[in-house]
Image: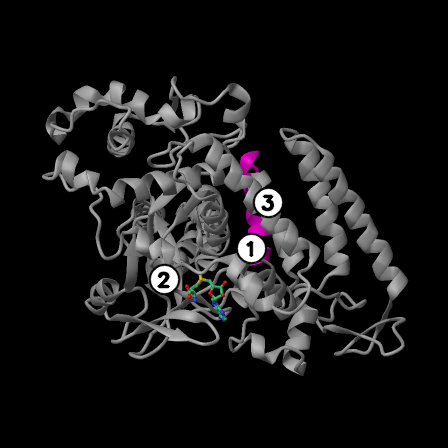
Amino acid sequence: MEQLQKALQDRGLIVTDSPEKGRCLFTTRDFCPGEVILSQEPYVCVPNNSYSESKCDGCFASSNLKKCSACQVVWYCGSDCQVRERFQLLCVLASFKSFNISLNFSCNNFQKLEWKLHRLECQVLSKLDKDRRKSVKPSIRLMIKLYLRRKLQSEKLYLLVCFDCQVIPTTAMDNYDLVEALVARSMLFLNNFLGKDMSDIDEKQLVLYAQMANLVNLILQWQEINIKEIAENFSKLACNAHTICDSELRPLGTGLYPVISIINHSCLPNAVLVFEGRLGVVRAVQHIPKGAEVLISYIETAGSTMTRQKALKEQYLFTCTCPRCIKLGQFEDIKESSILEGYRCKDDRCSGFLLRDSDDKGFTCQQCGLFKSKEEIKSKASEIKALSNILTSMSSGNNQKVLSIYKKIEKLQRNLCHPFSVSLMQTRDKLIKILMEVEDWREALAYCRLTIPVYQRVYPGFHPLLGLQHYTCGKLEWLLGETENAIKSLTKAVDILRITHGTNSLFMKELLMKLEEARAEASYKPSLED
Ligand SMILES: C[S@@+](CC[C@H](N)C(=O)[O-])C[C@H]1O[C@@H](n2cnc3c(N)ncnc32)[C@H](O)[C@@H]1O
């Protein structure tokens, strides 16, 4: 901890303890919007591979993949990624006495050993029979990697094997002690439910961790392993691991970033976590003065206070007391919930919000006083539910059918929900995605424009999702030849994303280049007309 405090001190940060939140990360200097507060490589990470989709284990790319022929579990996209992974596993296997590996090689001749080493790397997984291999889901692999990595670092093999290349050395920000210090869900269960009965769901969760721990034990077959400790580590992953996303916030995998995990949650965060490849980067999204706590959001912040609190309670077992959450039950909060998750006025031209009547027969618009009966609402809601059920039962691939169902849902929601409703916004997002897949740019743009005011309301300030929505709008306008509009949208996207994503990533370079091209085209067009 002392070592970590020292490393953080150099970055203008300090870890403190609070009785309500446990460890907290505070600033010891000012940070300006867009400034990197902290960045960290994952201690361990895995891509979220499934039967239908695979990604490279090294960089999460999804093209030009080759499956490792030995273990049949891991995929790589090319030699660079293979080299990195093979090197890591060589070090692990060198620590097993059963493998007679010479440690006398440097990184220069390391590549010659690639194939041989990779076979060794896969030793643990390739020992498994076909059925067991199928049970090696990403969460299980993450745990296996955690144990291999611990073994590696505890025996300081990296330094032994190749002291001059300094691949992943043990540092103040990268060691197993930091994993040990992470808060565990099981501890939170106990703290929360001491003296009370655990609910069924909590008990089931603990049983699941125990089953997963058994599976890890069967795969690793280490004599000295402690199953209880593995189960405890699964419960740590549940409230500390992060979903690794690409620049457009599409999930790619899961990673454990033990220092970033010290950062607590707020529904009104002053920082954001984004990923540059596997690197986790925390950036300030507002001015953070010296002495303030650094806070990110763990959840989708678009929902009502009740929805957010439920999500935080279920996964992280705490009740949020951020400036948004402390308003729970106050008139402003009730109004906000009725807008985000409530119904629309019977009069199409009215944008008032509806509140439930005291006799529970229906809802009344708080602006024009029109009444909407419960039956009316129920019938529309069940039509939507029936259509959603059809969608869940459908197999993927039938874009046109899916599109027509989403359009029906959107129409019903337009009639039922408040114009700023989150579920209506989400349905429109699904429509945009499908319409872009079928290359109907015009209609995709129409829906995208409808979502912008809702995004601006639910994701205020520098929020990456708002920036990305402006970007989508800009790309569609650009494709449709609406250059002036594209410039406006792309500029709005850049204004937000340069704060949340920085300007160095390939993604941002592409966005900045698109904006430049659009500006160049706009200045070229009038001269043509002249
Ligand atoms: C990723 S950890 C954050 C670091 C944690 N405070 C620690 O001591 O390691 C997540 C856990 O921190 C606590 N936490 C995070 N944000 C909180 C908040 N706003 N209020 C109360 N507890 C919070 C909860 O126990 C949650 O499960």
Q: Which stretch did the figure color magenta?
A: 436-452
The mark found on residue 208 in the picture is 3
Label 2 element class: helix
> In front of the other: label 3 or label 1?
3
Question: CB of residue at label 3: within 8 Å of ligand 1?
Answer: no
- Relative to 390, residue 494 above or below: below
As rendered, which of 329 and 94 lies closer to the eye? 94
Q: Is residue 281 visible?
A: yes
Question: Residue 224: which quarter of the image?
Answer: top left
Residue drawn at point x = 45 percent, y = 53 percent: 468
- For marks 3 and 2, the one nearer the N-term is 3
Choose top left, top right, bottom left or bottom right for residue 1: bottom left
> Label for residue 449?
1
> Mark 1: which secondary structure?
helix
Mark 3: amino acid? Leu
Residue at 15% over, 42% down: 166
Kindly report which numbered mark, 1 or 2, lies closer to the viewer in this rendering. 2
Query: Is residue 343 located in the magenta-colored stretch of the structure?
Result: no
* Residue 444 is inside the magenta segment: yes
Coloration of the structure image? one colour
| Residue 169 position within the rendered picture, expressed as x and y whole percent measured from the top left | 20, 46
Residue that lies at the very extreme toward the front in this rendered image:
223
Task: Using the image as rendered, state which of residue 58 and residue 270 is in the foreground.
Answer: 58
In the foreground, 442 or 452: 452
Task: Give the main secondary structure, helix, strand or loop, of the magenta stretch.
Answer: helix
User: What amino acid is labelled 1 in the image?
Assistant: Arg
Residue at mark 2: 495
Residue at mark 3 to residue at mark 1: CA–CA distance: 44 Å
Q: Are marks 3 and 1 in contact (CB under 8 Å)?
A: no
- Rendered view: 453 above or below 275: below
Mark toward the start of the polypeptide (1 vs 2): 1
Please tell me which residue is depicted at 33% across the width and 48% down the height of the picture: 42
